[in-house]
Image (tube, rainbow, N blue to C red):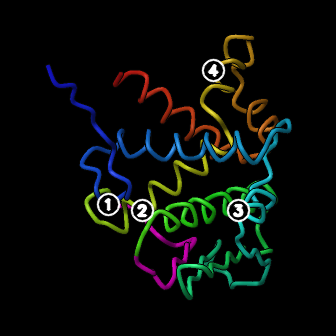
Amino acid sequence: MTKHTTHSPELPENFEDINALRRDASREASNIREVFWRKSFPVDPVKIALALGAEVYEAQLGSDIFGALLQDSDLSMRIYIDKDQPASRYRFSAAHELGHYVDRSRRLEVLSRDIDRRSNKKPDFNTNEGKREIWANEFAAELLMPQEEIRQQRENGNTSPIRLAKLFNVSLPAMNYRLRVLDSLEEAA
């Protein structure tokens, strides 16, 4: 009797199911957090990015850009974060760009840049770029607001999105969205 093993696709654009893509991004974020962040919450994505070897810069990127990842070669990637964001949004932008960094680190090809604009519409799962954006968003959400920690907080009676947002130092809209996604994943399971 042969034993069949399944292996998840390594690149976001290879996923045909959004929940499988989210699970892959969450798994990567959990692994990164466990290795590079053994401290309490909130998680500092900039320190993790630096520990992974990324160059991280704070800059004025204009009124429409949250962050960017520029890649000159397979060894050189630079993360730029717009310094004019609220602190909680800044951290999410840094974690999102770190997600792109981790995604690109799994690739053989060089992609020149990712620029994340404030004006961008919701990412479209039906496009490769959309899948990469959703993957980076899920990576950032799991890095900053781990599913397991949210579950423990809820079991301990901390169900207030406001208190959870403060614990993880994220914006209330980010926390509310995270809770909706986690609830939908639990319903799908």
Residue 16, above or below 183? below
Other residues around mark 1 within 10 Å, as few (<14) / some (14–19) / many (≥20): some
Cα separation between marks 3 and 4: 28 Å
Asked whether disc 4 touches disc 2, contact meaning CB atoms under 8 Å apart, the reply is: no
Which residues are the magenta region? 109-124
Cα separation between marks 3 and 2: 20 Å
Residue 148, above or below 168? above
* Residue sitting at the far right: 39
Q: Which residue is mark 2?
A: 132
* Residue sitting at the far left: 1
Q: Which residue is mark 3?
A: 52
In screen coordinates, is 6 left or right of 171? left
In screen coordinates, is 188 left or right of 116? left
Question: Going from the N terminus, do you reach mark 1 or mark 4 first?
Answer: 1
Question: In percent of the image, x 53 and y 66: which residue is there?
Answer: 105
Question: In percent of the image, x 47 and y 62: which residue is there?
Answer: 106
Residue 22: x %, y % from top left? 43, 43
